[in-house]
């Protein structure tokens, strides 16, 4: 990526830099490829809630997927129409349910009978009918990191396959609930598209059960999870949306009038974002060199939390490369962005880009060590 280094030099570090042109190109591909099949795409705002990005995403016509009342508020404040909001989450508080009902969102993705009971009661108090999709746990292995796999039976998410019948019977007795569809999300950073084919097969089996039981579904929400190439952010900056959507088109057996919905986060925003940080010190250990930078795990927690790989580049040096452990100033050994990262020879004052940080970067930052939040440049 060609970074605007001159602009960077006058900017206090650390900061998130977003390449808005890449975001726009990515959105163009998402819209074109999903549009081929009339698929509906919601942006999973948990991946990035930066208003500059949300404005572009809204302009492209995407809907939004929220997992808290705060995200519902954020979506509405950033101009998304409530009819394009889906609201998921295993633990929705009463105020969050009320807020979503009052806003008139498209659909609640519901995860349990007790939650359905609360939504039904609140909807009746407000004189409304809540549209819901059942989040069903399809027991499909996403082949991804254990912390971000969600579709296996032992995960806390969703309604088990064995419970679906009971849930549907209960819903029939709930006068303020309208069952609109079914929802799935099997995990994140999925790069093996055959996993999505397996999800389609499972959905097809379930659809037969719903049909036999004369339950009409008009929303099939397949969640998100499409992965990106963290190793080579410049080779494939835009994920393979063409093949991704084609898998669902080929393998999902839809009934008349059914809409397919997606909740994509990472694949839309990961590659357009980098965390830009300045080298404070180069420290020589006995076996290795440390590049100590002014960004910390509070700014980007993915390496510490998931041992996630992010490509690291020295963008102001063209001297021959050496290996460095790139570490932050936070008082934790896990405050390390990369071990033995190959960087152009590095000195105090150089600028470092930590790549593919547009998803689950800024939004997961904290003020640990009472540090200030990183800035933002587009
Ligand atoms: N829908 C639901 C119900 C989800 O739980 C998620 C993500 C998404 C959609 C969006 O998934 P995506 O398209 O972004 O894979 N913080 C972790 C990722 C956590 C994902 C949580 N759920 C990370 O940094 O890798």
Image (cartoon, helix red, strand yellow):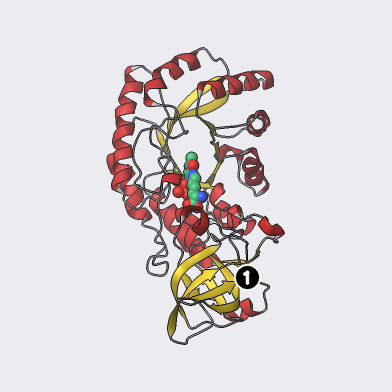
Image point (52%, 82%), residue name:
346
Query: Where does the image place residue 271, in percent across and percent down from the top left?
Result: 47, 62
Q: How many marks?
A: 1
Query: Where does the image place residue 248, in percent across and percent down from the top left?
Result: 33, 43
Residue projecting furthest to the front: 286
Q: Is residue 264 visible?
A: no
**Position of residue 80 in the picture relative to residue 354 (left or right):** right
Q: Look at the image and tell me in which quarter the C terminus lies.
A: bottom right
Residue projecting furthest to the bottom: 319
Element on which disc 1 rests: loop
**Position of residue 19 in the picture relative to residue 39 (left or right):** right
Q: Is residue 250 visible?
A: yes
Query: Where does the image place residue 10, in percent across and percent down from the top left?
Result: 67, 78
Give the residue at mark 1: 294
Q: Nearer the viewer, residue 184 or 352?
A: 352
Q: Is mark 1 within 8 Å of ligand 1?
A: no
Q: Nearer the viewer, residue 373 or 280?
A: 280
Q: Is residue 39 above or below residue 297?
A: above
Q: Nearer the viewer, residue 66 or 93?
A: 93
Q: Nearer the viewer, residue 262 or 93?
A: 93
**Position of residue 235 in the picture relative to residue 179 (left or right):** left
Image point (45%, 19%), residue name:
167
Query: Where does the image place residue 64, in percent across and percent down from the top left?
Result: 55, 44
Image point (55%, 22%), residue name:
116
Task: Please tell me how crowded label 1 is: few (under 14), some (14-19), or many (20+) other residues with Cα within 10 Å.
Answer: many
């Amino acid at each position: 990526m060609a970074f605007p280094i001159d602009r960077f030099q006058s900017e206090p570090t650390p900061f998130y830099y977003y390449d808005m042109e890449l975001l726009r190109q990515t959105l163009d591909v998402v819209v074109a490829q999903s549009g081929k099949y009339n698929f509906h795409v919601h942006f999973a705002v948990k991946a990035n809630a930066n208003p500059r990005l949300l404005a572009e995403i809204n302009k492209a016509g995407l809907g939004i997927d929220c997992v808290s009342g705060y995200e519902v508020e954020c979506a509405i404040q950033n101009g998304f129409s409530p009819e394009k909001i889906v609201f998921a989450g295993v633990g929705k508080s009463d105020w969050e349910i009320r807020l979503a009902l009052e806003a008139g969102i498209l659909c609640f993705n519901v995860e349990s009978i007790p939650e359905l009971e609360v939504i039904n009661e609140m909807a009746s108090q407000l004189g409304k009918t809540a549209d819901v999709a059942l989040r069903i746990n399809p027991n499909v292995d996403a082949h991804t990191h254990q912390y971000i796999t969600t579709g296996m039976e032992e995960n806390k998410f969703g309604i088990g396959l064995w419970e679906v019948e009971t849930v549907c019977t209960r819903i029939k007795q709930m006068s303020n609930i309208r069952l609109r569809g079914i929802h799935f999300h099997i995990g994140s950073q999925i790069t093996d598209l055959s996993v999505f084919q397996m999800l389609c097969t499972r959905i097809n089996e379930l659809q037969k059960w719903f049909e036999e039981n004369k339950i009409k579904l008009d929303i099939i929400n397949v969640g998100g999870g499409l992965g990106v190439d963290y190793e080579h952010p410049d080779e494939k900056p835009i994920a393979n949306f063409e093949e991704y959507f084609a898998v669902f088109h080929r393998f999902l057996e839809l009934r008349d009038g059914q809409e397919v919905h997606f909740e994509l986060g990472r694949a839309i925003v990961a590659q357009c974002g980098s965390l830009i940080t300045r080298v404070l010190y180069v420290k020589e250990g006995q076996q290795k060199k440390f590049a100590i930078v002014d960004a910390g795990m509070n700014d980007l927690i993915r390496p510490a939390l998931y041992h996630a790989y992010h490509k690291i580049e020295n963008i102001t040096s063209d001297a021959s490369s050496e290996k460095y452990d790139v570490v932050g100033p936070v008082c934790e050994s896990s405050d390390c962005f990369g071990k033995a990262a190959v960087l152009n020879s590095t000195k105090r004052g150089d600028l470092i880009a930590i790549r593919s940080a547009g998803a689950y970067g800024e939004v997961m930052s904290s003020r640990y060590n009472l540090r200030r939040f990183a800035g933002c440049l587009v």
